[in-house]
Amino acid sequence: MEVPEAVKEWYWGRVKGLTLRSLIYWIIIAIVLPVLSPLFKGVTIATLPSLHWYINAFIVIVLGIVLIFWYAAQMNRLDQELESKLKEGR
Amino acid sequence: MAIQPSKGMSPAVRNPLVAAVLVILLAILAYPVGREYLTSLILILGSILVYLVLAVTLRSQAAADFYVAGRSIPAFVNGAATAADWMSAASFLSMAGIIAFLGFDALPYIIGWTLGYTLMAFTIAPFVRKSGTYTVPELIERLAGGWGTARVVAVLMVFITSLTYLTAQLTGVGVVFSRFLGIPATTAVFVGVFGALAYAWTSGWRSITWVQFVQYWVLISMYLLPVLIAAASLGLLPLPWLQYGPLVAQVEGAEKAAGVTPLWTEPFARPFAGGTGQLNWILSALVLMLGTMGLPHILVRFYTVTNVHAARVSVGWALLFIGLLYTSASIYAAVARFSISKLWNQPLDAVQNTPWVQKWLPTGLVKVQDANGDGIIQPGELSFHNDIVVVGMPDMFGMIWLIAPLVAVGGLAAALSTADGLLLAMSTAISRDIYKRFINPQASEAGEVGFVRVMLLVIALVGGLLGYLALRDPTFSRYVALMVGWAFVFAASSFTPLIMLGIFWKRLNRYGILAGMLVGMGVALPYVLAVGIFNAPPLVLFGQKIGTIAWGAVSALANAIAAVVVSLLTPPEGKEREAFVDHMRLPD
């Protein structure tokens, strides 16, 4: 597939933007939340263990999974945009 | 494609299913003859046979099947296969135990061995798939503008990160057999070698992908079975993941009453990998994440999917499947700790006569010693091996004997699936990246596949021999365990920063890549050896000791800095690398 230079740049620019956003979310999930977790010691909701434990043992993993599927969906949409751009160009 | 919807049942589904039914029937028929022992033996050995039947059904002679499963694996299947590839004997048998005994301070294992996948999903996996390469060293060579030297160094890194890891898996097989069947572990290790070898032999990644897919479901069901039964008896159903808070509170209540300090969920109260404090805690987690992303046997999994979109989604499935085990490990830990706390401050003979303690005392996994001779067992007079948490759970709750061999079947699936991934990552590195690339570029497809098989045999036997030595010699075994943890440090210090830079920064060149790998390892290795093996005092930062795993953050950073600086000081790579990177950045 021959992709015009301008389209390539547009696409990669969007990918970089999305990667940067995902990276920020990832830093929040994988670093910031675990680092702050000890502050939530003794905070409990319903039958969950204390949040300082639960953030690391459960919450961040769920958020990590959600972020992957979110990124995949965003990239899918972007790839469709790319495809329609290329069709228009032809 | 391996399994296609067609009229009637595909042989890849039918054959292993028939084998599984036969094994179960045989196990039932064996009960009146050989009782629990024979039935357990048939179930455990039978599980190896079922995977073998599947692998043989999928046999192939094509090089593309051996290297990348013909790039035919759907995202969901690849996700489960990745999870099995990833979760080792240590994840299955020991991780819950480590959490049970280290509490909050063991949580870097949970976040560190999961959230690397999230970063991998948007920085590495889809691009690796799009690269069209077959192995990680090949990818490194292409990123280095077609420079063979980078590839050879990368092969060396594959071996440094994979061989000790393989040894640990084969040791795990030995442990499963000896614990559950009383067969000498040193003999059983070669049963593991035979199993892993046979699945990979038939058609490389193609056969082991589907075997790993099946092994995932086996290992996760067998992992959850005992903990869900225990949770039921403690009133934690239907969703123990959301309901185990009161149990943790009860455990800590018992600890307070018995004067145990620090409490189980107290943060930063115990060392982690030789370090202390919050900085060491979070850096260790970060290194485990970065290491995950650079482990060759995991990266290869993203070569095998059908397209770039499938690569992105399959990482999500992989983490979902891995998360199911990792989020359950804390429940295991809480339940085990609860059972153990029930023994505190009981009379010595009452503790010794508790059925599960009685059963596990001879194995040495449980130790009871009334040190102060008061006839009462205080918390400090009871000690447990990490592995008791998972393998001992069925006995702690008096479950029917059948549960124990099923847990063994799960542990075996975890060990074999990981062993296979490692075995193939190493043998394909030798065959494609050394033999085909440098020694015999004219090798026919049949010749190449033949060579992979010879390498499989050689590496499996080397791994088996190392596993045998580890089981015979406790000192050697200790080194193997340490090396497995450090595999993450080495992966984070060699491949991870370079692959990310290679994709996102076009100016990276061959010298930068070589400098990155050498400097990363050059910073990692001396510290890890000095502190980990020769007991040198660890570096202290802000009053906190930096352990060997946390040190990987420094070596990974050193790798990235060296790669950037050296690239900028030397000429840019030119058209070949630029075209390759452009190709990787576009979807298929």
Image: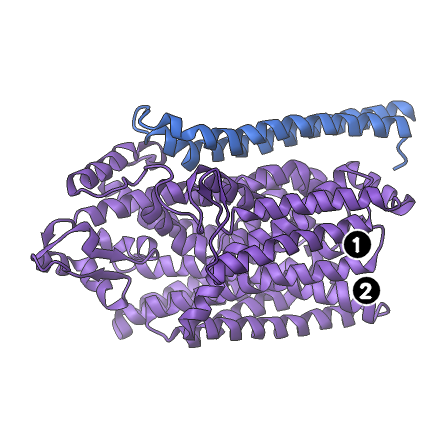
Q: Which chain: blue? A: A
Q: Quadrant of residue B450?
A: bottom right
Give the x, y percent position of residue B483: 52, 60
**Chain identifier of the residue bearing label 1 in the image:** B
CA distance separating discs 1 and 2: 11 Å
Q: Report in which chain the residue with disc 2 lies.
A: B
* Image colouring: by chain
Q: Nearer the viewer, residue B277 or B292?
A: B277
Q: Is residue B485 left or right of residue B258?
A: right
Inspect the image, locate mark 2, and give the three-letter code of the amino acid beneath it. Arg
A2 relative to B58 in the view: left or right: right
Residue B138 seen in the current view: yes
B153 or B430: nearer the viewer = B153
Above or below residue A1? Residue B192 is below
Left or right: where does residue B449 sit relative to residue B370? right
Determine which residue is flagged by label 2.
B437
Marks 1,2: beta carbons within 8 A: yes
Give the residue at mark 1. B141
Instruction: List x then y, in percent, for residue B474.
Output: 40, 70
Q: Say which colour chain B has.
A: purple
Whether residue B499 is visible, yes or no, is no
Q: Secondary structure at mark 1?
A: helix
- How many other residues sit within 10 Å of disc 1, few (<14), some (14-19) or many (≥20)? many
